[in-house]
Amino acid sequence: MKLTQFCKNNVPALGIWTDRGIVDPAVEAARRGVSAPATMLEAIRGGEAAISLLETLADGPTVEEAVLAPVVTDMDKLLCIGRNYREHAAECGADLPPAPALFNKFRSALAACGQAIFLPRDYHEYDYEGELVVIIGKPARNVSVENALSHVFGYTCGNDLSTRDLQYARAGQWLMGKTFDGFAPVGPCVALGLDPRDLSLTTIVNGEVRQNARTSDMIFDVAHIIADLSHHFTLLPGDLIFTGTPSGVMQGYPADQKRWLQPGDRVEVTIEGIGTLTNTFI
Ligand code: MG
């Protein structure tokens, strides 16, 4: 099953992602006289009962010309893992990290599939990072690697947009260079019941394949990331974890071949079993 959020009366509302289009579960629920989760966070917190109900509502009417919202909103944390693919660590000239390297973004960085993202003109070295993104389902504190995936709600595509000339200008801190408004696009949907361990991931910029990898090349896989983070703080329902980028980002290109993102560019991140996250830049 796949779920998403779309803009309804200017706020994010839960949608069911079907082959026919996006179904508004509230419409079919009202017709049947039942109450359905109104947002992704409500669906996550509703557990298996909410998902079972949503499955029965999936044959309802579709939304005309739906505008997508970020797939989940109002979560507690947006977490990101850096240098989590071997080839990407090599292209950065970095040693393999001994443990997951953690940074974060703010909720104000969230953006939807289809959204045009503004590139501030104060900086110039804008880079894409196509990534598998985990959405936490159940609170996780001190969970084992073996049990970690049972705390996942689902998976989506993300683009960990990065400002390299800011990332390295301020003593190497990652946060400032990665959390401009709109610099955490996620979507187009959340896939439930997906095995994250060996999925293909491609990033296409203006029609050209730049990243082409499999999640099996991660240094720390999803279960290890969740177990490690949960030993330090509680992961809460709706929390997002960007799991790191494969190689092929502009950062790793030779200096004379770097083509940073520009207004007018189009980036598509596709992950097997989920779909394609598309964004343009202004
Ligand atoms: Mg990244």
Image (cartoon, rainbow, N blue to C red):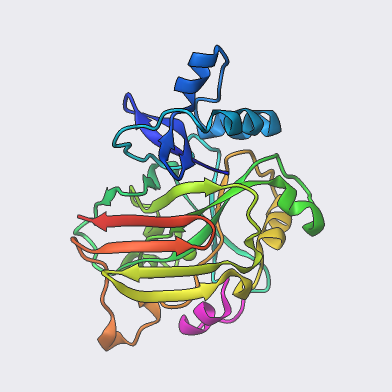
Which residue is at 79% across, 52% downward? 147
Quadrant of the snapshot with the N terminus: top right
Q: Is residue 88 above or below residue 27?
A: below
* Residue 52, visible in the rendered structure: yes
Q: Is residue 20 above or below residue 88?
A: above
Q: Is residue 277 left or right of residue 233?
A: left
Residue 94 falls inside the magenta stretch: yes
The image shows residue 213 at horizontal and vertical percentages of 51, 75
Residue 13 falls inside the magenta stretch: no
Q: Nearer the viewer, residue 174 or 15?
A: 15
Quadrant of the snapshot with the C terminus: bottom left
The image shows residue 236 at horizontal and vertical percentages of 64, 40
Tally the numbered discs.
Answer: 0
Q: Find residue 170 and report its image quarter.
A: bottom left
Which residue is at 36% across, 32% downward? 63
Which residue is at 71% across, 59% downward? 223
The image shows residue 169 at horizontal and vertical percentages of 35, 68
Range covered by the magenta-colored residues: 84-96
Which residue is at 34% across, 52% downward? 180
The image shows residue 207 at horizontal and vertical percentages of 28, 71
Q: Find residue 24 and report its image quarter.
A: top left
Q: Find residue 251 and report its image quarter.
A: bottom left
Q: Nearer the viewer, residue 37 or 52?
A: 52
* Residue 249, visible in the rendered structure: no
